[in-house]
Amino acid sequence: RIAENDYEHEGVISIHNDLFHALDLAGQHEKFEKERIAWIKVITKKIGDKNPYYASQVVTLAYCQIRLKKYKEAEATLNDVFPLLKKILADGWGYFHAKALMGEILIQQGKENEGEALLIEGYEGMKKRQIQMAPVSKVRLIEACDRLIELYTKAEKPNEVKKYLTEKALYKE
């Protein structure tokens, strides 16, 4: 369990990021969500809710909620943080990652046209900014390609499927 005083320890942000990554890889999304919410409360109290780190943690919470198929909650989570993202990270890859996630959410809720547009915008934005991404974060490009492949497979658009399979292969090198 995350304690409020954990924030004061040296290296704690890295440790918590490793914990969340491990929970995600292990498929322990309920625990991931619970711990992320607790962590967001800690950082909000310690550093506020108007900074890039806070915004990135909220986007990661939405990512977890999507994995749990909590699409309404994930949509609300992202809608709450979008104004901050647009203000402080509008030219960063994280803003476009959030757009791709919102695209996935809308598609899962049956709003394919709106979701497709956001998913493409998000993917293309991340692609243009991949130089900004840490190597571990480049998996977000692969995930966006996977979402587009799934969308176009269901829509029976083989040329689009082929396009994103080709793009995805570029990131697996």
Image: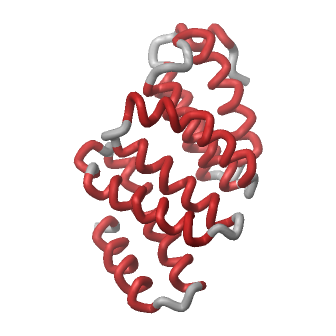
Q: Where does the image place residue 162, in percent across and percent down from the top left?
A: 38, 86
Residue 32, horizontal then vertical, whole percent: 68, 40
In the rendered image, the vertical position of residue 164 relative to residue 90, given as above or below: below
Q: Is residue 141 above or below residue 81?
A: below
The colour style of the image is secondary structure
Q: Quadrant of residue 142?
A: bottom left
Residue 62 left/right relative to 153: right
**Residue drawn 71% across the image and 48% down it:** 28
Work out whether residue 75 or residue 35 is closer to the camera in this orientation and state it: 75
Quadrant position of residue 95: top left
- Left-right relation of 130 to 120: left
Residue at 65 percent of width and 67 percent of height: 111
Q: Residue furthest front?
A: 114
> Residue 50 at x, y = what percent?
50, 20
Classify residue 36 as left or right of residue 8: right
Q: Residue furthest left?
A: 131
Q: Position of residue 152 (x, y in %)?
A: 51, 82
Q: Nearer the viewer, residue 62 or 103?
A: 103
Quarter of the image with the C terminus is bottom left
- Viewer-proximal residue among 159 and 82: 82
